[in-house]
Every structure is written in structure tokens, then in C-alpha cells.
Image (cartoon, rainbow, N blue to C red):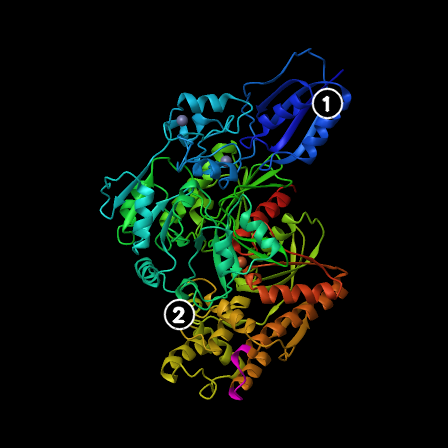
């Protein structure tokens, strides 16, 4: 007989860990105790050495599906002569550092429960959940994760639920949000004036309304969706019109895997993500044109998710299999998650509201992911993923993140927690929303930041926040943060060649960077290459109107005599004021942004309108290239080095593109050649840098790498030239990943 004391750390609470331990111990005739503590799950085991070994092996190999074990500490213990195995009351101290579990999509057993017409408590019950599934992060008000500290405290468990909750062998043992028809939250369907409808089955009625073409605001797990029938072009155009969202692709919720296969291609890796417990919006290749064109227009992908709560499952039937499900917010505003806000703010958009009375404490949007090079890559980290936990050498640091696609990071005891996607911080409301979520995580984890990290941009949104802060303040450069976020996620400590291609970020020379080659590690960087500079006439207006970028590129490449090379849709009347701005340096900041180069080339190749969502012109250009016959053809480029900085001259490339246009070359082929050229000059420059700096690792970061064609082609070229390529997976390559880089850099700098 032997006794061991075991501490399991990681995501081990609220994921069915104690029942798992209880049953495993019982099966192996082991005695002792298990309990949740501030540090994880603590186990005392007594029994034969062989069985204890078996126990540890099972614990390592087959822990509960939703758990994530970081560490198992085993120590010899004194034999207490227990005569059974028991689950003890949790013990917590103020030093709590339990890792929060994200919200989890409904599990297959709960799906069976809601479909089982004999189950009087859970048949068709929209809030069914168990230890393996259901809301977590979005309902937690404080730690430890126990019912009184969640928004389920409003509901008193009925005797039947309580019995399940207290039975270690039940699937709902200590499932904090557990409930049933008799004791849990309820649904209400309201008309557009917010008046409740007197009906017996709100879900059935909602299905009828959707089939009739209405738009229904539906409260889910982390916020509201606007939902309509995805087979109805009319409903879609009404939604687009009311939401003022003319062209941005809309996400779909499809009934099941079979429905997804009707409209989309699905690889093995994609299927794993689609069916897994996180249920993000997965970008999949369209298979045909069966669904209305206006869902995603010319975009070759559809954003697809499967229903992830009982309520979502119940919205479908045999004749309603595809829904548009887009986050409910006005553009530039935070996602709505409270009933009263939804009723106020969606009045001009929604025809009906399907509400419930389980409060969402912290909103969490749908995540967006794409499988590229057979790996899941996160574009928007939110429900099912956030909050992330990383091991980072850092304590009590807050990194504020980016202005657009914001997330933030906060650290304690060498753990870094990365928030869910917050969005663009460009209004008072969004800044207030961000501050609210920062305060929530600070309180939850009991963190008082000793230092804050922020972007060096002088006009940044967080100016007031930083000024008011009294601890250490550490400014970080945008592109350094990009590369370090990629290094941190991949646990790379070395110095690397970092390539950051993105929109714009403030650089150390005061200009707007975005095509950066950096020699860097997690502490410092040296800029060694970039595109030569060009002007953004009108500043941000040039981002909205890509043809302005085209004029700027043409101006740099041809001088003032542009009449013969202008895109056919612009007149010299329109270009004259622009040329005067460029010539006289009026409101025309210098940039070397890869994103703006894409914009300008897209405009040369026919993208004539303004953009209505970020990177629209870049996506246009990628789609053009993807539709081209395969070709390895290139344009010329000029690579020159002065004082250790390589500059890529794009003017040669622009002149070549114009020549191709004038000779009638198809725009898809031009776009393909443009992509090829970027990959080749990037490889070319990497080879020079490898020689000079004796470095072989290349890290790719920045939003431009969401361009799959560019990313996969460059990745292939680098690998086949023996580079070691480091890429983003869990952490987005776009600005949502910046906060992690900021936190790591700041943590290194304060060590000095
Ligand atoms: Zn379940
Ligand atoms: Zn109940
Ligand atoms: Fe960026």
C-alpha cells in the first residue's frame, strides 16, 4: 500500500475533472479524496502501487476532453487509511490562479437529451448543458467557478437538478450552469416593438417567422445574432440594407455536416474543426452557387458554423437548413449582449426578438478560423477559444493591444491571459467596452498591473489610459509586436528574420510602416528592409478609396504625366486635386505599407469603388489571382541596399503592370504575376539576410498573410530553400495578435 498526493494544473475546473478522477479511482479500487483548489485539482490517492501507476497513466493519456493539463505534480504522502474515495468541498485562497474555460458548444449527449421526447425535463429545452458543454467564460462573474459566482445564481435548482448536480457519477455533477425546464432560464419571443407574443412555443414560432422572410434577433451564449433564412435573397438584401452592410460576407449557420457538404468543400482537417467542441465560423471553399450570391458575392469562401447551443439546434427543421447568423451590432459599436440594449438598438433592423433571461456577463463574439496548410489558423479569437492561456516569463503586466481588431493580454505568475476579440477601438463606446473587459479580467485574476505596454503611435486611442496610469509604461513598435507574437506562440527564443506585412503601423522614423523585414528577438529589433515609401493622399481617406492609392503609385512611377496611364474609371478632373496634394505634400503621409500597395494595384486592376470593410480590395486582388491559370511569370523589381537597409523599389513593378494592362493582358494573370513577384522578392531578400546575419528562421506575421495565395506560395518557396518558417496558428497574424507581442516585449524590457 502506498499514498500519493497529486496536483493537476491547467484547465481542470468546470470540465468534468473530479467525476473523472472519482470514477477512475473507483475502477482501480483506490481510496482517498479529490477537490478543486486555487491551484488546480488536488488528489490524495491510497492503494496498490500498480493501481496508482495505472491511475497516473490514464490521467496522462485520457483526461476529460475539455481539460487542458499544464502540469501534474506528484509527491509521496502519508497513508490516512481512507475506506472510500470522496469528492471534498473546494478550498480556495486569495492567490487564486485557476484557468478559465471558454464557452463550449453543446455536446452530443445533450443533443440526445433535447431530442428525447420522453425526457420531460430536457426535451426541447433550450438551456440544456452538462459538465462537458455549455456557457463558462461568458457567465462567470468571479472565481472560483461556482454557481453563486455565475449569472446562473438567479435560478434555484429544482430537486431533480440538485440530485444530478450532487451525484459524482452523473454527467451533470457540479455542472455549474445545469438546469431544466422546471428551474432554468426561459425564452420569450417579442415583436418589433418589444411586446411579448402570447404563444406556447417561441421556437416553433421563430422558425415560421424565419421561413416567412423575417429578421429575428436571437440571444445566444455570448451575445446577439441577427438571423434570417439564408435561402431567401430578399431576406438577405433586407438585412444588408438595414444593417448598412452592403458587401461584407455574412456568416452562415448550417443545420448539420450534411448541409455543409451540400454547399462547401470539406477536407479532413476542416471537418475536425467544424465538428469539434469550439464550433467557430470556419471559412470553407464554396462548392457551387446554390445559395444566394449576395451572402458572400465573389468571395470563393463561405463562413460556416454549426449550431452550438440547444436553442440554435432547435431553429432548424427539415425545410429550414441554412440561416444567416451575423453578430448583432451597429457598425463600429460593440456586439450587443443585454436584452434592453438589443431592444433599443436593433429597433430599425430586427422584426422580432427571441430573448432569454440568462444574463450574459461578458460578451464573446463568434470566432473565425481557416484551415491553411492543413492547420487551423485563427483569424478572430473569441467564443470557444478565449481566454487563451500562454506560459510567458511575465508577471503583472497589461498589454493594451491594437486600435483595430483589439485584444489585450494580462499576465500573472508566468501565465499570460489573452482576451477575446474586442473589435475596433474607434468610438467612445468601444473604448468603454474594452475598459470594462480589462477591469473584469483584472478582478477575476486578482491582478494589479505593475507595467503597461502600448503601441508607440502618438495619436493612439489609449493616450488617456496611458497618461492616467502611474506604473511603468512601455511603448512597443507595431511590427516588432507582430513578429514577437508569432515567436511567443511558437515558443521561439532565438533571433529571427521577421517579415511583417500589414496595413499600417507607426514606425521608429515616424512614418507608417507595413512591409517590414526585421532582425529581431523578443526584446529588440533592427529594421533591415522595406518597400520604398509612397504617399497616402488624404491619409485615411486613401484607405477607403483604393483608387487614391493607385494614383499615388502611378505618380511615383510615372511622374506627373499620368493621363495615358490612368484607370479608365477615373477622370483627370478627379485626379487633379490629388496630384496637387501629392506634389505639394498636403495631407499625404508617407507609408511603405504592403496592404496599401495591394489596394493600389487592386484599383489599377478594376476595383473602382470605396471599400466597405477592411481589406476588401486586397481580397479582390487575391480572388482575381486565384482565378488565373497557374503561371510562374514575374514582374521586375529592384532590390538595393544602403547602410544595411534593403529597399524594394515597386515602381518598376507598377510600370510593368501598366504595360500589361495596355497590351490587354487579363487582370487575373496580372494579379497572379503580382503575387508571384512579392513572393520572389521576399525570398530574394531573405537569402541576402541569411547570408549577412547567419539566421535561418523566418517568422511571418501581419494581416496581409491572411491572403492564402501569398502565404502558401511564400511558405513553399522559403521551405524549399531550406528556411525554417514560423507561422501563426492560435494567435491571429492580424492586429488581434499584437497584444501578446506587446506583453512579451514589455516583460523582457522591465527585467533590466
Ligand atoms: Zn453536454
Ligand atoms: Zn431543474
Ligand atoms: Fe498590423
Provide residue 512's location: percent of width, then percent of height: 52, 64
Q: Looking at this view, is 734 or 541 the one in front?
A: 734
Tell me the mark number nearer the camera, choosing from 1 and 2.
1
Label 2 sits on a secondary structure element that is loop
Find out whether residue 664 is within the magenta segment: yes
Q: Which image quarter is the C terminus in?
A: top right
Residue 739 seen anywhere in this rendered image of the structure: no
On the image, the x and y values in percent for residue 108 come to: 52, 40
* The disc label shown at residue 75, or none: 1
Task: Characterize the local packing of mark 1: few (<14), some (14-19) or many (20 or more) Cα atoms within 10 angstroms.
Answer: few
**Between residues 307 and 430, which one lies in front from this camera angle?**
307
Residue drawn at x 40%, y 31% as measured from the top left: 151
Q: Which residues are magenta?
A: 662-668
From the viewer's perspective, tell me whether residue 70 is left or right of residue 214: right
Residue 233: assigned label: none
Does the image show residue 41? yes
Q: Within 10 Å of the Cα at label 2, are there few (<14), some (14-19), or many (20+) other Cα atoms? A: some
Reading the image, the residue beneath label 2 is 610
Find out whether residue 394 is within the magenta segment: no
Q: Is residue 333 above or below residue 28?
A: below
Q: Residue at x 77, y 61 (%)?
A: 694
Residue 354 drawn at (x, y percent): 32, 44
Quarter of the image for residue 614 reads bottom left
Q: Which of 22 and 696 lies nearest the eye of the viewer?
A: 22
Question: In the figure, residue 15 lies in which quadrant?
Answer: top right
Vertical relation: 52 (above or below) 441: above
Tell me what residue is drawn at x 56 percent, y 34 percent: 99
* Residue 466 point in image, percent of width and height: 47, 45
Q: Nearer the viewer, residue 415 or 330?
A: 330
Amino acid at each position: 500500500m502506498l499514498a500519493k498526493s497529486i496536483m493537476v494544473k491547467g484547465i481542470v475546473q468546470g470540465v468534468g475533472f473530479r467525476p473523472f478522477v472519482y470514477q477512475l479511482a473507483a475502477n482501480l479500487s483506490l481510496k482517498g479524496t479529490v477537490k478543486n483548489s486555487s491551484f488546480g485539482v488536488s488528489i490524495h490517492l491510497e492503494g496498490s502501487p500498480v493501481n496508482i501507476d495505472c491511475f497516473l497513466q490514464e490521467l496522462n493519456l485520457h483526461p476529460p476532453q475539455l481539460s487542458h493539463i499544464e502540469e501534474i505534480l506528484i509527491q509521496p504522502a502519508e497513508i490516512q487509511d481512507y475506506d472510500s474515495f470522496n469528492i471534498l468541498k473546494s478550498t480556495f485562497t486569495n492567490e487564486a490562479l485557476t484557468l478559465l474555460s471558454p464557452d463550449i458548444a453543446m455536446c452530443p449527449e445533450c443533443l440526445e437529451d433535447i431530442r428525447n421526447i420522453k425526457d420531460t425535463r430536457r426535451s426541447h429545452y433550450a438551456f440544456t448543458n452538462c459538465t462537458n458543454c455549455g456557457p463558462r467564460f461568458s457567465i462567470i462573474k468571479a472565481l472560483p467557478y461556482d454557481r453563486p459566482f455565475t449569472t446562473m445564481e438567479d435560478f434555484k435548482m429544482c430537486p431533480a437538478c440538485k440530485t444530478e448536480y450532487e451525484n459524482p457519477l452523473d454527467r451533470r455533477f457540479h455542472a455549474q450552469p445545469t438546469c431544466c425546464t422546471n428551474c432554468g432560464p426561459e425564452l420569450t419571443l417579442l415583436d418589433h416593438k418589444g411586446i411579448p407574443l402570447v404563444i406556447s412555443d417561441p421556437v416553433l414560432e421563430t422558425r415560421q417567422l424565419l421561413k416567412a422572410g423575417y429578421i429575428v434577433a436571437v440571444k445566444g451564449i455570448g451575445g446577439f445574432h441577427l438571423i434570417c433564412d439564408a435561402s431567401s435573397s430578399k431576406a438577405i438584401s433586407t438585412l444588408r440594407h438595414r444593417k448598412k452592410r452592403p458587401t461584407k460576407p455574412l456568416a452562415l449557420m448550417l443545420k448539420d455536416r450534411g448541409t455543409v457538404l451540400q454547399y462547401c468543400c470539406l477536407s479532413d482537417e476542416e471537418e475536425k474543426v467544424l465538428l469539434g467542441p469550439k464550433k467557430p465560423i470556419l471559412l470553407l471553399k464554396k462548392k457551387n452557387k446554390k445559395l444566394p450570391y449576395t451572402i458572400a458575392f465573389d468571395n470563393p469562401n463561405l463562413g460556416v458554423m454549426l449550431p452550438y447551443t440547444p436553442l440554435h439546434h432547435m431553429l432548424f427543421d427539415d425545410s429550414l437548413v441554412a440561416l444567416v447568423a451575423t453578430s448583432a451590432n451597429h457598425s463600429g459599436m460593440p456586439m450587443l449582449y443585454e436584452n434592453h440594449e438589443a431592444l433599443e438598438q436593433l429597433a430599425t433592423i430586427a422584426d422580432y426578438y427571441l430573448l432569454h433571461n440568462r444574463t450574459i456577463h461578458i460578451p464573446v463574439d463568434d470566432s473565425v478560423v481557416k484551415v491553411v496548410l492543413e492547420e487551423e489558423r485563427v483569424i478572430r479569437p473569441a467564443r470557444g477559444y478565449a481566454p487563451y492561456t500562454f506560459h510567458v516569463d511575465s508577471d503583472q503586466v497589461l498589454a493594451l493591444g491594437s486600435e483595430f481588431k483589439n485584444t489585450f493580454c494580462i499576465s500573472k505568475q508566468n501565465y499570460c491571459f489573452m482576451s477575446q476579440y474586442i473589435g475596433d477601438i474607434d468610438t467612445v463606446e468601444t473604448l468603454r467596452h474594452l475598459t470594462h473587459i480589462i477591469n473584469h479580467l483584472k478582478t477575476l485574476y486578482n491582478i494589479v498591473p505593475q507595467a503597461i505596454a502600448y503601441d508607440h503611435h502618438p495619436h493612439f486611442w489609449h493616450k488617456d489610459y496611458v497618461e492616467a496610469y502611474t506604473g511603468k509604461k512601455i511603448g512597443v513598435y507595431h511590427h516588432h509586436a507582430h513578429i514577437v507574437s508569432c515567436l511567443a506562440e511558437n515558443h521561439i527564443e532565438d533571433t529571427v528574420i521577421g517579415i511583417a506585412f500589414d496595413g499600417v503601423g507607426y514606425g521608429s522614423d515616424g512614418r507608417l510602416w507595413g512591409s517590414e523585414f526585421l532582425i529581431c528577438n523578443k526584446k529588440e529589433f533592427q529594421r533591415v528592409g522595406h518597400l520604398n515609401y509612397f504617399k497616402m493622399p488624404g491619409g485615411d481617406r486613401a484607405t477607403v478609396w483604393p483608387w487614391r492609392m493607385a494614383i499615388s503609385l502611378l505618380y511615383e512611377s510615372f511622374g506627373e504625366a499620368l493621363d495615358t496611364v490612368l484607370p479608365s474609371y477615373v477622370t483627370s478632373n478627379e485626379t487633379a486635386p490629388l496630384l496637387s496634394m501629392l506634389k505639394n505634400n498636403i495631407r499625404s503621409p508617407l507609408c511603405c505599407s504592403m496592404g496599401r500597395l495591394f489596394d493600389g494595384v487592386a484599383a489599377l486592376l478594376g476595383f473602382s469603388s470605396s471599400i466597405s470593410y477592411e481589406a476588401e480590395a486586397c481580397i479582390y486582388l487575391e480572388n482575381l489571382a486565384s482565378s488565373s491559370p497557374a503561371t510562374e511569370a514575374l514582374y521586375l523589381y529592384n532590390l538595393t541596399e544602403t547602410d544595411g537597409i534593403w529597399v524594394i523599389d515597386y515602381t518598376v513593378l507598377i510600370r510593368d503592370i501598366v504595360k500589361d494592362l495596355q497590351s490587354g493582358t487579363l487582370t487575373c494573370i496580372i494579379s497572379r504575376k503580382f503575387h508571384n513577384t512579392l513572393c520572389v522578392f521576399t525570398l530574394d531578400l531573405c537569402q541576402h539576410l541569411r547570408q549577412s546575419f547567419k539566421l535561418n528562421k523566418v517568422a511571418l506575421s501581419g494581416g496581409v498573410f491572411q491572403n492564402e495565395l501569398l502565404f502558401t506560395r511564400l511558405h513553399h518557396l522559403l521551405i524549399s530553400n531550406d528556411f525554417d518558417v514560423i507561422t501563426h496558428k492560435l494567435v491571429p497574424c492580424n492586429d488581434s495578435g499584437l497584444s501578446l507581442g506587446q506583453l512579451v516585449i514589455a516583460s523582457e524590457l522591465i527585467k533590466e
